[in-house]
Amino acid sequence: MAIQTNLTDKTAIITGGSRGIGWETAKEMIKENMNVVLISRNKKILQSRIDELDQYKKQVRIFPCDLTNPTSALEISKYCISEYNKIDVLVNSAGAAKGGIFSEIPDKDWEDSFNLKFFGTIRVIRTVIPYMKEQKDGRIVNVIGDTGKKPNKLMLPGSSVNAALLSLTKGLADELGQYGIRINAVSPGPTRTERILDMFKSLAKSTNKSIQEIEEEFLNENIIKKLADPKDIANLIIYLSSDISKNITGTTVTSDGGRSKFI
């Protein structure tokens, strides 16, 4: 007997929905007959996604906005309710951080990291909670990253944000459980997204190495010696959004090819 996700006709908001893991999650959710609202700063890319999903246009909406703007989160929730009358799932997949040598990272890079990924996440969560409480049901999935548990010395702004979001996920689960709302995190390791491929190209140029050499060095700590496919992470998000995982909350699911060595 096939496992039933019971996601048909559910509605999801996906931040960072135009690229990478967010975009792959949107496509998988559409296969589950869900409605999705894609959030991104880049209106042009969002529009191209709508065009790509033309046959599913009843199931897809786009909402271009900047999550560093404090008013954007409320606008997102209001828009989703106006289009689909409910918010069942929130996937927080937006956010990137600049790195470098600690002493050379300016305050602005730290501020930008927290404003987008940390404050952007908590603001959207805060605005969807009232709707989920009213439904007595809701699922929140935070896409965080493996540096939250194992900080990278050259990625400390992002590592710090990820650690803060891990704490938020665990702590908030205790408050939301009484309302039937589950919150979990997915913590990917190296994943084949545009962002990481651009980083490999930049490192290859600065070190006079090939992109393949850079990738192999980057995966040195992995047991599985290849980058994850964004679809691999999307499938975990589907799992945590579905009834299959209805007894799981406050948990972080790590998908890093065996990179993490802690128990």
Image (cartoon, rainbow, N blue to C red):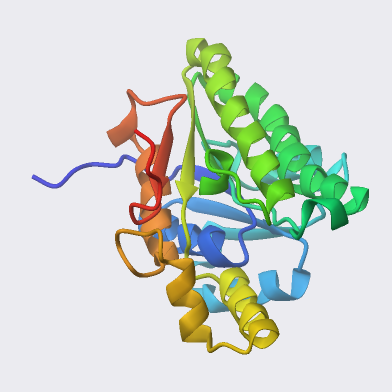
Q: Position of residue 132 (x, y in %)?
A: 57, 25
Tell me if 250 is positioned left or right of 236 in this view.
Answer: right
Q: Position of residue 114 (x, y in %)?
A: 78, 42
Looking at the figure, which quarter contains the N terminus? top left
Q: Looking at the picture, tell me which residue is in the foreground, 176 or 107.
A: 107
- At a point 50% along the width and 10% down the height, the residue shown is 178
Tell me if 110 is positioned left or right of 22 in this view.
Answer: right
Q: Position of residue 16 (x, y in %)?
A: 64, 57
Q: Position of residue 187 (x, y in %)?
A: 48, 45
Q: Looking at the picture, tell me which residue is in the foreground, 18 or 1.
A: 18
Residue 8 appears in the figure: no
- At a point 34% along the width and 27% down the height, the residue shown is 246
Residue extending farthest to the top is 178
Looking at the rendered structure, the number of numbered marks drawn on it comes to 0
Residue 71 appears in the figure: yes
Q: Looking at the picture, tell me which residue is in the foreground, 123 or 13.
A: 123
Name above or below for residue 201 compared with residue 151. below
Residue extending farthest to the left is 1
Name above or below for residue 239 compared with residue 25. above
